[in-house]
Image: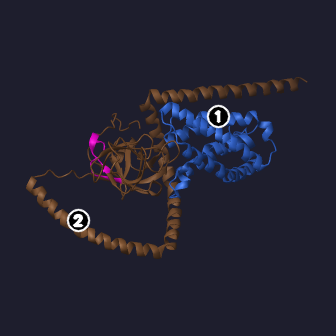
Chain colours: A brown, B blue
Amino acid sequence: MQTNGQMSRFGAMKVALHRLAFVVLVVAAFGLMLLGKADTLLVSRVGTAVSDALTPVLEVMSKPAASVGAVMNNLRELAAIRAENARLREENQRLLHWQTLARRLEAENQRLRELGNMVPDPTPRTLTGRVVADTGGVFARSLLVTVGSRHGARSGQVVVAGEGLVGRLTEVGARSSRVLLLTDINSRVSVVMEESRARAILVGNNRNRPDLAFLKSQTGVSPGDRIVTSGIAGAFPPGLPVGVVASVDEGHIRVELFIEESRLELVRILDYGLNGIVADPGAGNAPP
Amino acid sequence: MRPTPWQSLIQTLRSLIPFGLSVVLLLIAIVPMTTPGFLRAGPMVTVLCVYYWAVHRPDMMGYLGGFSLGVLEDILMNTPLGVSSLVLMLVQAVVLTQYRFFVGKPFLITWWALALVALGAILLKALIIAVLTGHVTAPGALLASYGLTLLLYPVFAWVFAWADVLLSKEA
């Protein structure tokens, strides 16, 4: 009888402890939310430390995934090889025409620069990193890359892939960095329409196609128009290719980016020496 | 008979298997896969993990496990710290308060119950994030994530059931 009583007391105590743990941890979760609002630098540093520690693991895990992805890509490409070949031939013809034109323009440009004593654009220092985590999701869009402060990365640096702008570094650890993608809801990039030179802001929306906002007038904007960075605010250098207008609905202009976020394996980090709008609080880390 | 220190260590390590497996699945979910666009909808991997263990072996992943998994998810996903922890612990609490309902139920019933729990979880998470950041998530994106979460549950349940059998054999 006494043993039964002891056991029931033990059971009741266990249930009470379980409930207490729940209450304490719920309070702790709210505490973390408040801390995240109050001390973004501390939270950012903790996040960077954890990401840094996990990067070697993610790097190992991403290699077989990349191999599987490459095999799947090969299979997909094999299936469409004839059509792709025809498309590439046609594109080659078109590009040869553009090459001739570009050479002529380059020569003309060179002459005009010499005539005007123009100061040449700065050549950026380049770092290349592998993408080890793609946290593209519903609530945030970012990448983790294997380039950190020990390689010379700093927060605010520009990240590009072959086809165009990817985003910028927001948190930099010793061996890894977080790239805030253009599609992230916190991303704002000053852009310009390449043809009309109309300025606008590219606003991330956590979807594949970010919005074009603060454009003075939508008239004259049509699908296919190219968009490049404007260089205003100093966060990005001018002229980096961003994407093309995908759709123009009432009040909404969606942009198709040149890069395909889900297919990024290697990215280039460009250092133009711009401090931009991202302040570097001493330790190389910045809140997003 | 009191367990030897070695047996205690093995026991502790075994009790960490559900949490460890959940962390591995979370990491796999963020490894770049060059997958088709629809898979980037961002399934709620951690909700699947805590839901399975709360339904089948509540003793194997307590609130501390859910809290820690949430903190790790928020750090990796760049979402406000504490949000996922709160949501995951609430998922655990909801399942544990309805534990009698889940006992011995077939897989389809638990899948159906997940549909309700996951809906509450994603709406709550979107609401807290909207309050904290001022950004309202598009309903379409939430729906895509929710749908993908439900679709992935059988895969996760299969992996966890395999681990569950392994744990039961060695117990």
From the viewer's side, name the closer residue of A240 and B90.
A240
For disc 1, the chain is B
Eye-nearest disc, 1 or 2: 2
On the image, the x and y values in percent for residue A26 come to 61, 28
Asked if B39 appears above or below A276 in the picture, the reply is below
The residue tagged 2 is: A102
From the viewer's side, name the closer residue of B79 and A255.
A255
Q: CA distance from mark 1 to mark 2?
A: 60 Å
For the residue carrying disc 1, how many other residues have a C-alpha within 10 Å: few (<14), some (14-19), or many (20+)? many
For residue B155, side relative to residue A191 (left or right): right
From the viewer's side, name the closer residue of A190 and A148.
A190
For disc 2, the chain is A
Image quadrant where residue B49 sits: top right
Q: Residue at x 46, y 58 (%)?
A: A263
Asked if B100 appears above or below A246 in the picture, the reply is above
Q: How many marks?
A: 2
Query: SS of the residue at dot 1?
Result: helix
Give the magenta-colored segment's residue range: A228-242
For residue A65, side relative to residue A279 (left or right): right
For the residue carrying disc 2, how many other residues have a C-alpha within 10 Å: few (<14), some (14-19), or many (20+)? some
Query: SS of the residue at dot 2?
Result: helix
Discs 1 and 2 share one subunit? no
Look at label 1 and name its amino acid. Answer: Met
Can residue B67 be seen in the rendering of this structure?
Answer: no
On the image, the x and y values in percent for residue A233 come to 28, 39
Magenta stretch holds residue B108: no
Q: Residue at x 45, y 48 (%)?
A: A143
For residue A23, side relative to residue A66 (left or right): right
The residue tagged 1 is: B89
Look at label 2 and name its amino acid. Answer: Ala
